[in-house]
Amino acid sequence: MEVATGQGEDGQPGAESSERLQKVLARAGLGSRRACEDVISAGRVTVNGEIAALGRRVNVARDAVAVDGVRIGVFPGLVHYLLNKPRGVVTTADDPHGRPTVTQLVPDRPRVFPVGRLDADTEGLLLMTNDGELAQHLTHPSFGVEKEYLAQVEGVPGRAALRLLRNGVDLEDGPSAPAKVGVVGEARDGVLRIVVHEGRNRQVRRMCEAVGHPVRRLVRVRVGPIALRELEPGAWRVLSAKEVRLLEVAVKPGTSPLPSARPEEAASADRRSRRSARRQPPG
Ligand code: URA
């Protein structure tokens, strides 16, 4: 992988640290260089807010690149993982109590950080990345990215409890925002699907407790457009370029998803990343 240090790709004087825009976009997973040239020619790419022309060069360490108004992470070496966090593992880099941590379950290089956090007792989807800007956007409340949980609760929540959960529950740090709440399967099983877009500490547990149905088991199954699907507890996989793009779009509402040119490129990148994830032992 090329890292922009000191000299441009063609070593021309004055081309320090710059690379051709189509090359940078292709490396970020937006398709072949040819497809990326089409996207640039169509005026869909901006560099530092200005529409880029074909032939434009960029410095990936300095320039802000966006496609269809959606920022794209172009720095080489950005990685994005999806981990199925098991119960009992803490969402920190180091635990003073010596408990297992999520960072021990993914490769240690490049160093990645969890996007938000799950309680030690909560299982399921945790994104981990070294893409600080994307992580910050995904966790910032102003973007309102949805988080979907399956909660096994005590007792059988009735209509009043469900209504409260949906409309907002009084919590010590203020009422919870309206949430989507549904019953999964038979009501007597006590399994709820809860979709929130806040990221408050132990929020789902506190909401359920407040309506008289404490959580016994909590699994996060989706963050924005990314769902957990089939992944063993403790296993992880690399997000495809398409999935990363969907996340980038999710934090910039009102814009289109993947550039439509050569969608097969994104699909083949997706297959490649799945193959590489299969080769990695989980944790
Ligand atoms: N809500 C909780 O109660 N716990 C989590 O880990 C995440 C959301």
Image: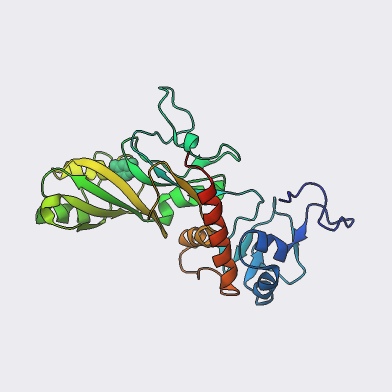
Which of the two residues, 61 or 188, is positioned nearer the viewer here?
188
Visual colour scheme? rainbow
Rendering coords of residue 123 (x, y %) = 34, 42
Is 210 on the left or on the right of 201, as rendered?
Answer: left
Picture quarter with ligand 1: top left
Q: Which residue is pictured at 60% across the width and 75% down the height?
A: 261
Is 2 on the left or on the right of 81, as rendered?
Answer: right
In this view, 89 is above or below 192: above
Rendering coords of residue 207 (x, y %) = 22, 45
Q: Which residue is pictured at 75% across the width and 66% down the height?
A: 56
How many numbered discs?
0
* Residue occupying the far bottom of the picture: 42
Q: Which residue is pictured at 31% across the width and 46% down the height?
A: 219
The quarter holding residue 64 reads bottom right
Which of the two residues, 77 or 264, is positioned nearer the viewer here?
264
In this view, 150 is above or below 122: below
Rendering coords of residue 55 (x, y %) = 77, 69
Is 87 on the left or on the right of 238, as rendered?
Answer: left
Residue 135 visible from this viewpoint: yes
* Residue occupying the far top of the picture: 97
Residue 241 visible from this viewpoint: no
Q: Which residue is pictured at 78% across the width and 46% down the height?
A: 5
